[in-house]
Image (cartoon, grey):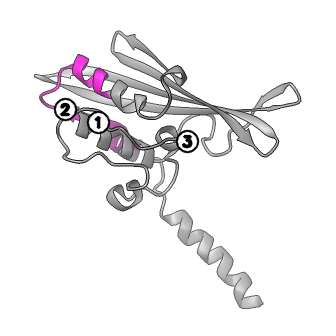
Amino acid sequence: MKKTLLLVPLLLAGCGAAVPLWTRDYASQQTTRTYASAPPAVVAAAAEAVVRQTAAPRDVTMKRTADGVVIDRYYVGYMGLRSVTLDYTFTLHVTPEGKGSRVTLDLAAQRTFNDNATDYSHDTVYDGGTIPYGDPYRLFFARMDYVLGKRADWVTCAEAPAKLGAQIALDPLCTKVSDGPIPPRG
């Protein structure tokens, strides 16, 4: 029994080590890409195509901005006897760079539970809205690479762990999603 109790903290420490710390350098590495031959309008359209794959059209809203696009994806469902609304926000900043574009993605999530007509936010996974894990960014950019013709295959939610090393927090792109049909390549 004592040996088992000693193993639990070691196992938990090992699991925690698999998720890199969200440092400034790591965050920049995960959230920023350069597309040398894709102008900003093409990159914004590719981002829209990627997010459109995640939900029904009525659950995705898009707003073009001066420097990119803001895309909201909603999901309303049930957890136990409570209803829950998940609101994922993809903010894509696109700046011209030569003949192409430099892209920075900000992902945020808000979870709202409704209990007996009382709404309250409960956000333990995403620490104040920001998603501090590289996995959903890697999946997003792998799909952007496909739409923009830089990658030969569309990475499904089921394939993400094997192909990208993704382990956690794929929710923004994978909550209640069927992985088809694949958008056309650019």
Q: Where is residue 81 in the image (x, y as percent from the top left)?
A: 82, 42
Image position of 152 with respect to 64: above or below? below
Q: Nearer the viewer, mark 3 or mark 2?
A: 3
Task: Decide which of 79, 4 is in the foreground and name it.
Answer: 79
Q: What residue type is labelled 2?
A: Tyr
Q: Look at the numbered discs 2 and 1 and tell me whether their residues touch, using CB distance below 8 Å.
A: yes
Residue at label 1? 144
Q: Which of marks 1 and 3 is in front?
A: 3
Residue at label 3? 176
Furthest-right residue in this view = 116
What is the crowding at mark 2: few (fewer than 14 residues within 10 Å), some, or many (at least 20)? Answer: many
Q: Earlier in the sequence, mark 3 or mark 2?
A: 2
Q: Residue at x 17, y 26 (%)?
A: 38
Residue at label 2? 35
Q: Earlier in the sequence, mark 2 or mark 1?
A: 2
Q: Where is residue 158 in the image (x, y as percent from the top left)?
A: 43, 55
Q: Where is residue 59 in the image (x, y as percent from the top left)?
A: 54, 24
Image position of 102 with respect to 137: above or below? above
Quadrant containing the C terminus in the rendered view: top left
- Horizontally, residue 96 falls left or right of residue 92, namely left
Q: What residue type is labelled 1?
A: Met
Q: Residue at x 37, y 38 (%)?
A: 31
